[in-house]
Amino acid sequence: MDKISVKLRWSDHYKYSPQLMHVSRPSNPHSIFWIILGGNRELSINNITYELSEGDLVCIPPHCQRTDLSITGDKDMEYLVVGCDFKIGSFNLLDWYRFPVVSTVMDSEDWEQIQRLWYQLDVSGRSLLHEFITTDDPTYDESQFKMLNVHQTLINLRINAILSEWLEIIMKNVMPVIPVMHGLPNVIDERINRACSYIDTHLAEKLTIKILADHSFLSQSQFQLLFRKSLGISPMKYIQQQRFEYASQLLLSTNKAIREIGQSIGFDDQRHFSIWYKQACGLSPTQYRQQWCGPEQGHTVLPRKTV
């Protein structure tokens, strides 16, 4: 239980006018939730098209292929957004429990509470952000948040409490449509958990099967077999995924230079990091940062915030 973690990254209130759209978004390292307040639109997630309408809850998992498609009908498309970390250890809960991309919550007795808590979360997030941000630059260095005074700490605690309550209600409403087999917790050997934690805190270092196997007190062959059995991927694939996710988070939430971000995940050469990142994402680090942090067109939106 102590491995469950939540962290607000941003909240937004979008309102689009009816229009034709076909906008491919770069993958995002965070869990994204939409609460549809009105209008209709199409959304493609991992090449599957979904019809969205008023009262829908949309759960967009991290690192998915996403394309925003046409807004249908003659009504404005309006929705609330929460971007957050929602994890058990290193693993995202939307993938862990196979959350449905689209489910209906308007008929739920929690519909009004979901909206009410979003507004409380949004106000609290703005209050904390106002304490630190004095520029219109959409990115900033998260190290500003490492030292909080008493007032800022109280706001941060409030944000965590509201977000946890909001996610609890979301999970309660989604739970009936989660496949039974995925409603049960995955069992991962503690030695593999320990290896994952080691990887996550040593991304800037050279990581080999031998180093990880020794850390897990297993032979190299035993370690590789147990790792793949537990997570379904090889240790080296997991390392690449975690490096990509961490680099993406730094690109979105800090002003760190591209060279510095590359060094934080083990690339001494900026050019090699940029080539590697573009192969993984389809965009260079600079393009990725511009795509997500730059202004979007064709909608009315409250200023984006990251906490």
Image (cartoon, helix red, strand yellow):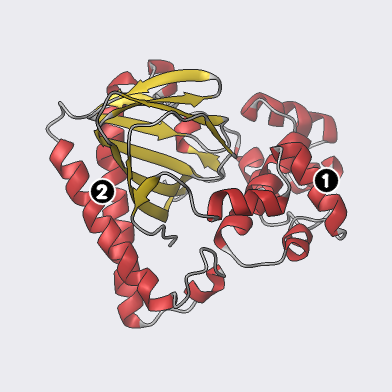
Q: Amino acid at mark 1?
A: Ile
Task: Please state the total of marks drawn on the protein image.
Answer: 2
Between label 1 and label 2, give the one nearer the viewer: 1
Tell me: 78 left or right of 262: left
- Vertical relation: 87 (above or below) 21: below
Q: Residue at x 38, y 82 (%)?
A: 149
Residue 105's image quarter? top left
Question: Which residue is under mark 1?
Answer: 275
- Vertical relation: 225 (above or below) 85: above
Q: Amino acid at mark 2?
A: Glu
Alpha carbon of mark 1 to alpha carbon of mark 2: how far? 41 Å
The picture places residue 184, in percent across and down from the top left corner, at 41, 25
The picture places residue 91, in percent across and down from the top left corner, at 54, 40
**Looking at the image, do the residues carrying marks 1 and 2 touch, with CB atoms under 8 Å apart?**
no
Q: Quarter of the image containing the C terminus? A: bottom left
Q: Residue at x 58, y 37 (%)?
A: 63
Q: Element type at marker 1?
A: helix
Is residue 207 among what the camera can see? Answer: no
Q: Element type at marker 2?
A: helix
Q: Earlier in the sequence, mark 1 or mark 2?
A: 2
On residue 241, the disc is none
Question: Which residue is under mark 2?
Answer: 165
Tell me: 139 left or right of 41: right
